[in-house]
Image: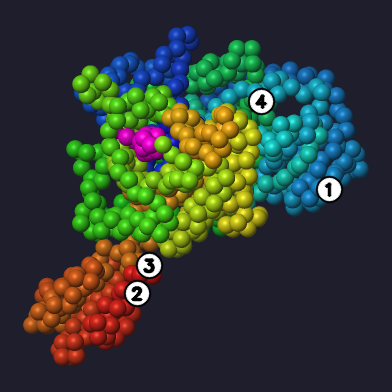
């Protein structure tokens, strides 16, 4: 099922060195790796952009989005659209410190006078601040009471310690109430966050909940230097490296600093500059000019100057009309204001130095907190990710509050390059791709061995855990997807075609088909739970520009399963799924963290049902790992039910979201699923099942990529496509090696014989480089004794062993998943 309408994702980029990002998709997540080009077309999918003439809005066409979807000739036609170029001659060529910087600052200062006058009318009343430990603070260091419109989180922090105040990146403030003269509208807080789409594309997990379960409380990230505006029920001080929100704020501020450097050096027109899951970027318009690697050093030097000045970040509220005046020379900011900010409303800008930018914030207190900065790569992209729009230049960066962190980051980037699954898969002849079927992997013999082993591994668990494996069609009449609701939100990502005058599509997920199967017979409460497992082939019509190795493909399989159960069975079924997950990822040598994502604001279904379901999930998680071992992700559940997000960590401590457990109340309603109860009372004879979506691997293709990088191509024996290489010391010993090879093959192992003319040492080395788990060296004494001399991939000499004993050893490794 798609989370909140299967929102499309993707971000433009290219080159090397950027951090990994994770994009949520149906049932699993997609990782974007360093150096991968990803189009940023999410905003373009539904955006309306203003033309440079300042009036007519034009809708973005799908043909203009970066990359192309594959289309069947008889399928739905996509209308072509014209260019929507708004940059014009706003960029006059590279020039340092252009005159419009001072002009913009002058307009800013005029607006600031108006805001200061408004602030003078606010009533400064005493407020209290409650810390996470329950301690209530009322006075600052000067023993003066905390006052609304005056006291800042920094003022609060310094009453505890100077170190806390200086090291905090941002505050997380939960208001129990606002002062009477505070208005979110007046404060520019009711509009749309103009970077939300780009941040989602960049893998930034945004806090969609503004409450702690109490609708009267409001939790917000708050600048350390921004005056508080109400009674604070809880104040937390967040540090970089300890909290993802702090990281996001730090990198967002760093993007502003880099944007300022770009304006200083080249006079380019900035567009958007969001934080990513690991770093940030800024897009700018430079006409026909382009960024070059030679620019990296200059940008880093200019950033260094800005950081040295410790420029303060200053927040200011502006009206839409003031914004249009402030950014009159930047057609892209004008377009954002025109399309995103309603007439008569307000939004916010941040200033640091002479950079002034449309921004919701929050930010770090000053630029001096950035102690280490590096530009990592650049690429070309397009405004709103639409190739009909202006070409932009994107520069990526990374920053840290400590130089040692940057050094460690660079080392990890080099390791990541070495472990890139595309590099390893090519080197080991595991997969190939071809333009005639872009986005669909060709599994070469050795790659297919791993693929099939993963499926066999999950099948063995299905047998032991009471799942019934089923097979469902690959193509369906589109009426099925209208009934499930997917056609409304997800049709663009489906392969659609005409069948005898009706529209059909290849299935992008299994859920609706499983619902048809459940509904095909009368079900009793005694039949539940029913656990359907399906390795069916799925197809999604991803943009060609978004296709990335095995992490973003058009053809894939999932270890997909749907459990239909009674409400009283939720806890046990979820606990069973969690134990399933634990066994799988323990086998892979990966650790994990659990998060419970609860009811979102736009949830469907009765509140009481949600509350009972969330309690059942929480109870299952407590039983599984103990109370306090997991965290709540408030308001981040799917619209159709709460879910457990499972974040797994690989050998490089990178986070992947592969497994998922989601409750669904809506598909059973859409498909009118029901079962007979044991209650004969009128109106109680039937009930709806709860549907549990769960996957352990997620996409087999993507899990292959994750494991390839987790193991660095050194596959464990049970999963290895090259398990044993037999090496005769002399050519006349080849027959014995072939006999042993046959015995190994008959026992179910992948064994080869090196009959080349290379020396024994060269053969051993070649086998180790090819990642054979064992090399079995055979000389005359081994033939006489019916033994083999065993070496490992790591060149550890195990010594002689009888062939039967060796096969028994391999069986133990295989049975124990080693």
Whichever of labels 4 and 2 marks the residue nearer the N terminus, that label is 4
**Which dot, 4 or 2, sits closer to the camera?**
2
| Camera-nearest label, 3 or 1 | 3
In percent of the image, x 43 and y 63: which residue is there? 587
Q: Indicate which label's residue lies in the foreground, 1 or 4.
A: 1
- Which element carries disc 4, helix, strand or loop? loop
Cα separation between marks 2 and 3: 8 Å
Residue 437 placement, left or right of 267: left
Q: Residue at x 81, y 50 (%)?
A: 160
Quarter placement of the C terminus: bottom left
Q: Secondary structure at mark 2?
A: helix
Residue at image location 68% in from the left, 30% down from the top: 315
Q: Dot 4, crowdedness within 10 Å: few (<14), some or many (≥20)?
A: some
How far apart marks 2 and 1 lie (CA) works out to: 58 Å
Q: Which residue is mark 1?
A: 135
Q: At numbered mark 3, what does the secondary structure look like: helix, strand or loop?
A: loop
Q: Earlier in the sequence, mark 3 or mark 4?
A: 4
Say if the magenta span includes residue 329: no
Indicate which disc residue 298 carries.
Answer: none
**Residue 19 image offset from top left, x and y in percent:** 46, 47
């Amino acid at each position: 099922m798609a989370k909140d309408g299967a929102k499309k994702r993707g971000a433009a980029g290219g080159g090397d060195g950027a951090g990994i990002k994770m994009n949520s998709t149906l049932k699993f997540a997609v990782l974007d790796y360093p150096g991968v080009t990803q189009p940023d077309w999410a905003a373009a999918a539904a955006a309306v952009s203003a033309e440079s003439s300042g009036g007519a809005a034009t809708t973005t066409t799908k043909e203009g989005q970066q990359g192309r979807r594959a289309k069947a000739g008889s399928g739905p036609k996509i209308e072509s659209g014209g260019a929507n170029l708004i940059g014009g001659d706003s960029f006059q060529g590279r020039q340092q410190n252009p005159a419009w910087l001072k002009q913009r600052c002058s307009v800013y200062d005029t607006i600031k006078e108006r805001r200061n006058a408004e602030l003078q009318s606010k009533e400064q009343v005493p407020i209290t601040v409650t810390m996470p430990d329950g301690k209530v603070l009322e006075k600052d260091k000067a023993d003066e009471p905390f006052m609304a419109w005056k006291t800042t989180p920094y003022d609060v922090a310094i009453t505890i310690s100077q170190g806390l105040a200086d090291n905090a990146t941002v505050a997380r403030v939960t208001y129990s109430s606002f002062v009477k003269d505070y208005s979110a509208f007046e404060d520019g807080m009711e509009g749309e966050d103009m970077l939300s789409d780009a941040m989602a594309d960049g893998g930034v997990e945004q806090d969609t909940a503004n409450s702690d379960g109490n609708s009267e409380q409001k939790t917000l990230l708050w600048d350390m230097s921004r005056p508080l505006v109400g009674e604070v029920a809880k104040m937390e001080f967040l540090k970089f490296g300890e909290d993802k929100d702090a990281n996001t704020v730090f990198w967002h501020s760093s993007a502003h600093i880099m944007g300022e450097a770009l304006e200083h050096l080249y006079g380019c027109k900035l567009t958007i500059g969001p934080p990513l899951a690991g770093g940030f970027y800024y897009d700018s318009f430079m006409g026909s000019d382009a960024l070059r690697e030679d620019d990296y050093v200059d940008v880093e030097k200019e950033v260094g100057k800005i950081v040295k000045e410790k420029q303060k970040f200053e927040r200011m509220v502006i009206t839409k009309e003031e914004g249009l005046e402030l950014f009159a020379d930047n057609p892209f900011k004008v377009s954002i204001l025109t399309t995103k900010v309603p007439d008569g409303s307000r939004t916010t800008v941040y200033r640091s130095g002479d950079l002034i930018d449309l921004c919701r914030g929050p930010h770090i207190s000053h630029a001096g907190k950035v102690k280490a900065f590096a530009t990592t790569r650049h690429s070309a992209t397009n405004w709103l990710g639409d190739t009909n729009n202006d070409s932009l230049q994107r520069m990526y960066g990374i920053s840290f509050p400590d130089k040692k962190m940057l050094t460690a980051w660079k080392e990890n980037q080099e390791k990541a390059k070495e472990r890139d699954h595309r590099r390893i898969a090519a080197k080991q002849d595991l997969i190939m791709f071809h333009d005639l079927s872009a986005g669909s992997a060709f599994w070469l013999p050795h790659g297919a061995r791993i693929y099939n082993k993963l499926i066999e591994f999950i099948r063995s668990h299905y047998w032991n855990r009471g799942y019934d494996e089923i097979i469902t069609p690959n193509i369906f009449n589109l009426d099925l997807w209208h009934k499930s609701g997917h056609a409304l939100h997800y049709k663009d990502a489906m392969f659609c075609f005409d069948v005898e005058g009706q529209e059909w599509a290849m299935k992008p997920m299994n859920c609706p088909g499983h619902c048809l199967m459940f509904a095909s017979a009368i079900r009793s409460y005694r039949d539940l739970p029913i656990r359907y497992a399906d390795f069916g082939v799925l197809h999604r019509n991803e943009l060609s520009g978004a296709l990335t190795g095995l992490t973003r493909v058009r053809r894939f399989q999932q270890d997909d399963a749907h459990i239909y159960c009674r409400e009283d069975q939720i806890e046990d079924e979820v606990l069973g799924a969690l134990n399933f997950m634990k066994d799988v990822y323990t086998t892979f040598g990966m650790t994990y963290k659990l998060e419970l994502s609860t009811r979102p604001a736009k949830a469907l279904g009765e509140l009481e049902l949600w509350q009972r379901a969330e309690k059942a999930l929480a109870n299952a998680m407590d039983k599984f790992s103990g109370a306090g071992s997991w965290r709540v992700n408030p308001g981040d559940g799917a619209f159709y039910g709460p879910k457990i997000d499972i974040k797994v960590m690989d050998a490089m401590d990178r986070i992947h979201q592969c497994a998922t457990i989601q409750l669904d109340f809506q598909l059973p309603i859409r498909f009118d699923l029901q079962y007979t109860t044991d209650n004969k009372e009128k109106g109680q004879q039937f009930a709806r099942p709860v549907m549990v979506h769960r996957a352990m691997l997620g996409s087999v293709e993507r899990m292959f990529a994750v494991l390839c990088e987790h193991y660095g191509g050194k596959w464990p024996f049970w999963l290895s496509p090259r398990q044993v290489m037999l090496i005769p010391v002399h050519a006349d010993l080849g027959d014995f090696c072939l006999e042993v090879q046959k015995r190994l093959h008959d026992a179910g192992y992948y064994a080869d014989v090196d009959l080349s003319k290379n020396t024994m040492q060269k053969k051993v080395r070649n086998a180790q480089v090819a990642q054979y788990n064992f090399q079995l060296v055979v000389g005359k004494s081994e033939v006489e004794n019916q033994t083999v001399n065993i070496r490992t991939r790591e060149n550890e000499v195990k010594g002689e062993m009888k062939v039967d004993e060796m096969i028994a050893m391999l069986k133990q490794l295989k049975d124990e998943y080693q």
